[in-house]
Image: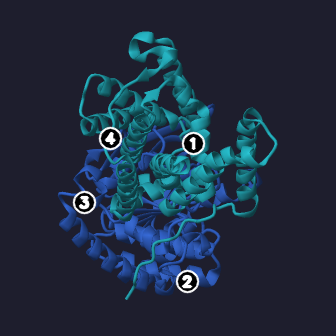
Chain colours: A blue, B cyan
Amino acid sequence: MLLSIRNAVKIFGGLRALDGVSLDVEEDTVTGLIGPNGSGKTTLFNIVSGFLPNDGGEIYFKDKRIDKLSPDAIARRGLIRTFQIDQSAVEMTVLENLLVSAPNQTGEKFWRLIPTIRKVLLEEKQNLEKATSILDLLGFKHLANEYAGNLSGGQRKLLSLGRMLMAGPDMYMLDEPTAGVNPTLIKSLLAFLRKEVISRKGTTIFIIEHNMKVISSICDKVIVLDSGRKIAEGTPTEIQKNEEVLACYLARAKKPR
Amino acid sequence: MQILSFINYWVNITAIYSIFALSLNFQYGHGGLINFGQVFFLCFGAYTVAITAQLGVNFAVSIVLAMAVSGFVGFLMSYTARNMGGTYWGIATLAVGEIVRIFFLNENWAAGGANGISFDVKIPYFEMVTLTLAALSFGFTRAVMASPFGRVIKAIREGDNLPLSLGKDVFSFKKKTMAIGGIIGGLAGALFAYQKQFINPEDFMPIETFIVWAMVVVGGKGRDMGTLGGAIIIQIFYVGTRFAKDFLPIDSNTLAALRMIVIGLLIMFVMMYRSKGFFPEKRRLYKVT
């Protein structure tokens, strides 16, 4: 099991945003996380990636406990997330956004810049090549030196995937990659995900998504959250037939008895 | 002859303030750290030089010591940035700057208190030294910003989330940004002391921080060349207004007050019509094949 969450609890004031959630994400699979608004999906992502401390439970990544680590330490272990609200560095160019994402750069250690200068230059060259090939995949070559702030919302979502590819994690956590993206671009985003990410061996994806078409077309397994609890788990087809899931989406009160 | 010694003074003070402005530009322009207490680097650098020079330490050694002390102060200051964001931290740094000044003002044993401290060690070819060190500081910040380290601190300028999610230890980068800024600022302080041969706490009023901020903002934050331009422009206004009393019927006290008004107006003009400064930041262009 690549990621395993045991009884995660998160409390905001009087609200139990996560109320003992346990779930597993297997290696080399795509696991979807769905649920109505406010069901705790993003909170779950935040505590897994270390951006919020959890108030209870344990989280294991590659069989090691990670729930007391800082976000950057978790990222260095190979778990990289995207954000629902775009976090691109808008004052940097598209290419710089990719270059900064490369992991373990020797040149990031300031006090060792001079002694390792040759290695740094070599790495820069390699990273530039890698970034260029990712620009190619994204179809962004003409935008390489454009400020990321000048990209459209949909293009920035693609750029966030590009940054992840550059970082090359063991597990991708995508928080609503298609929210606010037009249907045509969703198609190309999906095609990109399938062709360039999912098809790679050893790629594990944990994805929050509202678009059921996206879920059913890429997910091996779907987990449903409601009011901070896991209410269902199964293949996309099973989930779509699950009555409790339907009920939580279509207000329970109206359900005929 | 008088004009020659004046030009000499102007070149020195502009070079020193260019170095000082480069240190702020490194922290704020590149690293996004809003430091309103920048003057404490100048203060620590200058006092380190004054104290060591009095003890007869060689000038080169005392400059290196000043840089080390100031860099260490920056490193310590960064710890307060851990749990304080942006502007709140800026207010804290303003307070620290004042605490440092008032400490030197009231503690007579430390460095003469209000009477200040004077020494008699001169650096030979002082103009050459200041200009060379200004050029070196400029080259240094440019080189750092071209490195992967510089790229990360530039990303941190826009917020912690992205770099954190990519596995960058943001706090450690902030510590280094403060330390490097402190080292450069300490160099400016050291030269400042050698220029004046006498320092007292009056030299380190918050207004000095204001002036160096004006240089960065007017020149263009995030661009080292712009910072140099800003330092030159502000120094022309600052020092040049002294001549105005020869042409205008105003006494020198009014003029000193007027000087700050002029700089304030300049900042307002820049904010309204050239919000990115006279020399806006440039992106780094890569050749993509």
Separation of marks 1 and 2 at Cα, in angstroms: 40 Å
Q: Is residue B229 left or right of residue B127?
A: right
Query: How many angstroms separate mark 4 from mark 3 (CA)?
Result: 39 Å
Which residue, given by chain and number where applicable, does mark 4 sit on?
A: B123
Q: Amino acid at mark 1?
A: Gly
Q: Which residue is mark 2?
A: A187
Q: CA distance from mark 3 to mark 2?
A: 37 Å
* Category of crowding for the residue at label 2, using alpha-carbon neighbours closer than 10 angstroms: few (below 14), some (14–19), many (at least 20): some
Q: Is residue B104 visible to us here?
A: yes
- Could you tell me which residue is drawn at 37 percent across and 65 percent down? B146
Q: Amino acid at mark 2?
A: Lys
* Whether residue A104 is visible: no
- Mark 3 and mark 1, same subunit? no
Distance of label 2 from label 4 (alpha carbons): 69 Å
**Crowdedness near tag 1: few (<14), some (14–19) or many (≥20) residues, C-alpha within 10 Å:** some
The residue at which mark 3 appears reads as A106
Pointer 1 residue: B86
What's the distance in space between the residues labelled 4 and 1, CA to CA? 39 Å
Height in image: A90 above or below B45? below
Q: Secondary structure at mark 2?
A: helix
